[in-house]
Amino acid sequence: MTTKKTDLERLQTVVIENLEPCIDAGRYPIKRVIGQELNVSADIFKDGHDQLSANLKWRKATSTDWNRTPMKPTENDRWEGVCHFIENAPHEYTIEAWEDHFKSWQVEYAKKYGAGNTDLRTELEEGAILVAKAAERARRKDDQKRLALFSQQLKNADAHFGAQLAKNPELTGLMGAWPDLDLSTELRPYLRVTVDRSEALFAAWYEFFPRSADGKPNTGSKFRDCLGRIDDAKAMGFDVIYFPPIHPIGFTKRKGKNNSTTSEPGDPGVPYAIGSQFGGHKAVEPELGTLDDFDWLVDEVHARGMEIALDFAINCSPDHPYVKEHPDWFFHRPDGSIKYAENPPKKYEDVYPLNFYNPDWKNLWEEMKEVILFWVRHGVRIFRVDNPHTKPNSFWEWMISEVQRDYPDVIFLAEAFTRPKMMKALAKGGFTQSYTYFTWRNTKWELSEYLSELTQTEMKYYFRANFFPNTPDILPFFLQTGGRPAFLIRAVLAATLSTVYGIYSGFELCENVAVSGKEEYLNSEKYQFKERDWNAPGNIKDYIAKLNAIRRANRAMHEYENLRFHTVENEHILFYSKATEALDNIILVLVSVDPFNPQSGFAYVPVENFQIDVADSYQVEDLITGEKFTWRGRRNFVMLDPNSRPAHIFRIRRLIGMDGAQMIFA
Amino acid sequence: MTTKKTDLERLQTVVIENLEPCIDAGRYPIKRVIGQELNVSADIFKDGHDQLSANLKWRKATSTDWNRTPMKPTENDRWEGVCHFIENAPHEYTIEAWEDHFKSWQVEYAKKYGAGNTDLRTELEEGAILVAKAAERARRKDDQKRLALFSQQLKNADAHFGAQLAKNPELTGLMGAWPDLDLSTELRPYLRVTVDRSEALFAAWYEFFPRSADGKPNTGSKFRDCLGRIDDAKAMGFDVIYFPPIHPIGFTKRKGKNNSTTSEPGDPGVPYAIGSQFGGHKAVEPELGTLDDFDWLVDEVHARGMEIALDFAINCSPDHPYVKEHPDWFFHRPDGSIKYAENPPKKYEDVYPLNFYNPDWKNLWEEMKEVILFWVRHGVRIFRVDNPHTKPNSFWEWMISEVQRDYPDVIFLAEAFTRPKMMKALAKGGFTQSYTYFTWRNTKWELSEYLSELTQTEMKYYFRANFFPNTPDILPFFLQTGGRPAFLIRAVLAATLSTVYGIYSGFELCENVAVSGKEEYLNSEKYQFKERDWNAPGNIKDYIAKLNAIRRANRAMHEYENLRFHTVENEHILFYSKATEALDNIILVLVSVDPFNPQSGFAYVPVENFQIDVADSYQVEDLITGEKFTWRGRRNFVMLDPNSRPAHIFRIRRLIGMDGAQMIFA
C-alpha cells in the first residue's frame, strides 16, 4: 500500500516521473567518476495551465545542502538538466519542481496586453504582490531592494509600462533567483550516485604472478624481486599492477603441474588454495617474503605513479586457520566432517567453500570485510574479486558499501564470468568494474553488438567493463590460433573499445600454447614455476606501449559512453570513433578482426557528427605509425594487414588554412 | 540512501527484479477486473549453483493470508506465473523465491548416481535429513507420516533404490508442498492491483440530457419523463445511462443559445454552470424534478439491469452556495472579489474555479469527496469526471482511493482530452476508465497505431479506454462530413476496438450539423431545449442494437488486450481480430474507414494463430447480416460498401466434419 502522505505532501502536486538515469527505480546507485557529466531528464507536469519551473539538485550523501541547477523543458513535458560531481564520495540527486506564479503572471499579462487590454491595474497589482513576496524571501540585501523597487513600479505602472516590466530581464532573473518553493514537489526517494575516483573509469592493468617476476624455471621470485617486472609494466604504460592471491598456499591436497591432483615436492601450489600454517587471508605466502616486504613493494609501486590491485578469493584450503578456528563457517556432512567443493561429478578436495548462511554468518561476513580493510590499511585500494557470483549478492552490496563509506577510493572489480543478469546484478550491487564477455567476442558483429549494449544502454550507468583479452584461466581460441597478429588485434580492441582494460602477463610475449581442445594455458603458472624471457623475440611490448601512450594523450579515449560504430564495406574491419563533446579530440579506430589476411574497404566517416563539411578535406594522423593521410568527405579507403598494420588509430585534424597550395591542419 | 536491512533480510539473498507488470516501480496499482488473468514475470536468480523455487503470491489488501501459485522458469533467469482475482477490492501481489535444498539434492544425487558412484550413503543421509525436516514442517498428518516414511527409506536405501526415491513423484510433490521458506526472499514493497467489477472493463454507455428525454422544442423533460429514452437505450443494448450534470443551474451570467453570453428568459442554461439558490452539487435542478424523483429513476434503471452514471464537474456558478459559505475556497483579486475563470483573452464570467490550495483546502477536498459519497448513497456507482486535468493529480489519487476503500464498485471515468502524459498520469492515479483520442483517429494507420499503444503496451495495465465517437462537446469532422456511413463506421470501431464505449445521444440519429468550421454541434442542447424525433428516418438504432448484441454474445469481445491487427491489401480497410485464449471464440472485424466509396481487397487471416491449417476450409459467419462464407487459408477476398456493408464482423467456425460433399462447421 502507498505510504500515507503528510498534509504538505498532499499539496505538492507536481507530477515528476520517469526520471533517467534511474537503475531499478532507484534501488541501486548509478556510477560516475569525478568530473564526469550527468544528464538527468524526467517528465514534469501539473494540472491546469500554470507555468512550471524545475531544478536538478544533488549533494554528498552526508551533506544537508543541495547544489541546484535549473532544468529546461524540451518537448512532450520532458525536462532536462546537467550536473557533475567534484568529490569521490556517495552522492544523491533528485528534482524539485513548482508552479511558478510569477512566470504564469508574465505569460498571462503578455496575452492580455497583446489582446489590446488597456486597463490592467488589477493584473499589475497582482504582479506587484508576487514581486513584494519575493523581496521578503530574498536573502541578499541588494536583491531585496531591487525587488521592492520593481514591486513599487508595477503598482504604479500603466498597462504599457507594465508590459515592459513584465519582461524586464533583471526582474525575471531576480524572481528566478528567489522562487517560492513552499509547495515545490520533490521527487522521493532520492536517487543515488557512487562517485568514484577517475581511475575507476580510466586505467590499464597488468597482471603478473609475483613468483614469476624473474621468470626462473625452478624457483619462485619474491616481492623484493618484482621491481624489474613493474618497471617493465610502467614502460609499457600500465597504471595498475594486479597480483593473483599472495597469501599462504595450502599443503593438503596441493595441486601439481597442469592441475594434477597430486603434487611433487617443490611444486608451489595454486595461489587460490588459500591458507596454511603460515596464515590465511591476512598473511602473505612466506615464499614471497614478509608483510614488510609487501609494504615496501606497495611504496615502490606508488613511487612510480602506479598502484597495486590484490585478488580477493574467498577460498580456503583445508589448512586455512578458519577451518580450526571457525569450523561452523563451513558446510558439514552428516558425519560432521567438512564438505569440500563439488560440481558433480567433479570434486575439489583442496577447497572448502564457506557457508555464508551458517549460524555464525555475521562474524564470517564481518571477517571478510576485515580482510579487505586489512589490505586497505596496507595501502591497497583495488581488489579484483574472484567468483563473486558464488557468494550472496546482498553480502557484496553490504560489504562494498561498508568499505566505501570510509574508503570511497576503494575499487572492486567483479570477476564473474556467468549469466548476464547475475553479472549485471553484481555491478548494480556495488562492484566498481566488471569482467566481461569481451574475451570471447571476436567478430565484427559480436563486438559491435556487445559494445553497443555496454556503452549505449542503461548498463553504461552502472556496469564498467574492464576488458581482459586473456586471464590465467582463459587463453581464448582466437589467441591460440591467430599468432602474433591476434595479440595485436586484441590489444587494440581492449585498449580502445573500453576505458579500462588489462592483460595477463605473457600476453605481451604472445604466449599461446594451450591444453589441447581447451581454453587453458598449458603448463600454467597457476600450478608451477614458469621460465620466461620477458623480452623474448616477437614480443609486442612496444606496440602496447604505443597503445597506452595514445590512450593517455587523447581525452576522447578517457570517456566510456562516447563510443560509436560506423560503416565500413568489409565484414572483417571494425570501425568506430570516440570524440570529446567539444569535438577537439576525435579518434577513429579501424581494426581488422582477421589475423590471417589483409583486409581493405571503404570506410564511411560520419563527418557531419564532427562538424566537417562533406566537401572539406581533413587530415587523419595514424597515432601508431605517425603517418598522415588527407581524406575528404565520408567515403575513404583503408587497407589493413595483420602483420604490419592490423589497425589504424587516427586522430582527425581539421583544415585550418592554406599556405599557397599547401593545406594546413590543426 | 537504502534503508538498513534487518539481519534476516540480509540472509534473504535471492535477487528478484524487473517484475512485470509494474507501473512506475510499483508507485501505482495495475488494474484488473474480477476473473481476469494476471501474468506476472520476473528475473529470479541467486549466487552459486543451487536450485531455486518461486511462488507468485496475492491477497486482498486487507487480508493477512496469501494465495500462492508456483512460478516456472522460462529462459535467461526469467520466471512466470499466473493468477486471477475473485473479489472487487484492492489487492496486492508479490513474489517469494528460495533456494530449494531438496531440489538441489535431487539434481546432485542424479548426477553422482549417473556418474556411476555406488557409495552414496552420505548423500542419502543428507536427503533423509531434508525429508525429515519437511515432515516436521508439514501441517497435514498424512503428509507428516508419508514424509517420515520416505525419510526412513532414504536412510536405508542403497544407491540404486535411492535414485528411484530421489525422483519419486509423490516425494517430490510432498517436498514442494512443504518447502523451507525460512530464508525465502520476498519482493518488497508489494505491488498493488485494483480489482474492479467487470462493468469497469465491459459496458456500453448511452449519454443523454434528461431534459431532452421527450425531445420537445421549448420545454424540458423531467426525471419522470426519462423511461422512454431509457427503454430505447436498453433496446439498443446499452448498459449505462450517463447524464450530464443534473444539479441546479446558475442564473447569474447564464449562457444563451449557441453559447451566447446573454440568455433569454426561458433559456435552460448550461448544466455545467452548477449552483443556484436551489443548491449545489448535492441537489438536483428543480426543472428536472426532486431528489425523490431521481431516486425513483435510479431504481427504474436498476430494475432494467442497467445503471446510471453521473457527471462530476467541479464548476461553480456565481450562484453556487459555496460562494457565500466558503468564499475562501475561490481565487481572489487584490480587491477581494472572486476571480472568474480565464484563458486569456477568453473570459468565463459564469464560472468560478475552486482553489485546491486555499488555506481551507482540506475541507474543500473533503467536501468534494462528500459530493461523490452523497450520490453513492443515492445508488450511483459510476462517475464521469469533467476536466480532471485541471485539478491536482494528488487530489484524485486521494479521493478515488478513499471512496473505493468503502465502495470498491465505484467507477470513475476521466474526461481529460489533454496532453498524453497527463492522461496517463490520471489513469495511473486511480481513474477506472479514460476518454481517449479515439474521437479523432480516423485513418487505418492512426487507428492501428493508437490501438496498439492502448492495448499492447504497458498502458493496458492501467489505462482503460472508453471510446466515444461523439460527445456534447465534440462533433468530429469525420461525422460532419461522412453522412450516415460515417456513423456506422465509427459505431463499429468504437464497439469492437475497445470493450467499453459509449455514444452521446443524437449519434444514433446521425445528427451532424456543426457550428461552421468547428467540431461543435450547432444549436447544442448544452444551451437550449432541442426538438428531436428519436425514431427519425435514417437512424441507425437497429445497427447499434446488433453491435451491442454481438458484443454481449461473444466472449472474445469482453477482453481488452486480445486485439490484434492483420494485413489487408487496401489502405482503407482495417482488419483486426479478437479471440479467447482457448480459441473457442474468434472474431474477425473488417471495417472500411472510407465513408464514401466501396473498398475491397485481400485480407490475410492469421490462421496459424487460430490453429487452423493453411490447407483447411473454415466458415466465417457475418454476425451483422447472418451471411456465411467458406474461406480457406490465409488470403481471402472482402468487399465493403459504406452504405450497405461498411463492415464485416465475422465469427470463425471450424470445419468439424463432412456430410457427403457437405462441409459441417462448428
Image: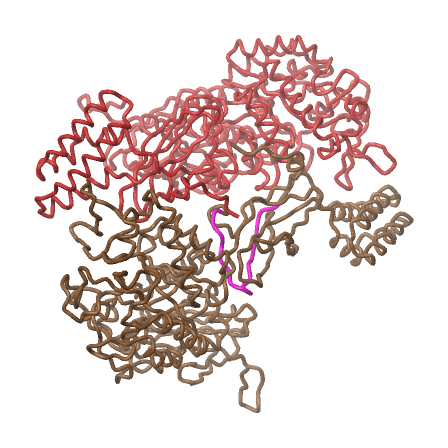
Chain colours: A red, B brown
Residue nearer the viewer, B22 or B482: B22
Image side of residue A160 versus residue B363, left or right? left
From which residue to which does the magenta span run? B27-44
Q: Position of residue B362 (x, y in %)?
A: 38, 46
Where on the picture, by quarter, is residue A614? top left
The residue at 64%/29% (across/down) is A386
The residue at 37%/36% (across/down) is A96
* Quadrant placement of the C terminus of chain B: bottom right
The residue at 40%/37% (across/down) is A186
Please tell me whether residue B33 belongs to the stretch shown in magenta.
Answer: yes
Image side of residue B533 versus residue B401, left or right? left
Asked if one can make out residue B569 in the rendered structure from this viewpoint, the answer is no
Residue nearer the viewer, A53 or B158: A53
Residue nearer the viewer, B533 or A611: B533
Q: Where is residue A615 in the image (x, y as percent from the top left)?
A: 23, 36
The number of callouts visible is 0
Q: Is residue A468 above or below residue B593?
A: above
Q: Position of residue B455 (x, y in %)?
A: 44, 61
Please tell me whether residue B227 belongs to the stretch shown in magenta.
Answer: no
Q: Is residue B101 above or below residue B170?
A: above
Where on the picture, by quarter, is residue B538? bottom left
Asked if one can make out residue A571 in the rendered structure from this viewpoint, the answer is yes
The residue at 37%/55% (across/down) is B368
Q: Position of residue B554 (x, y in %)?
A: 49, 75
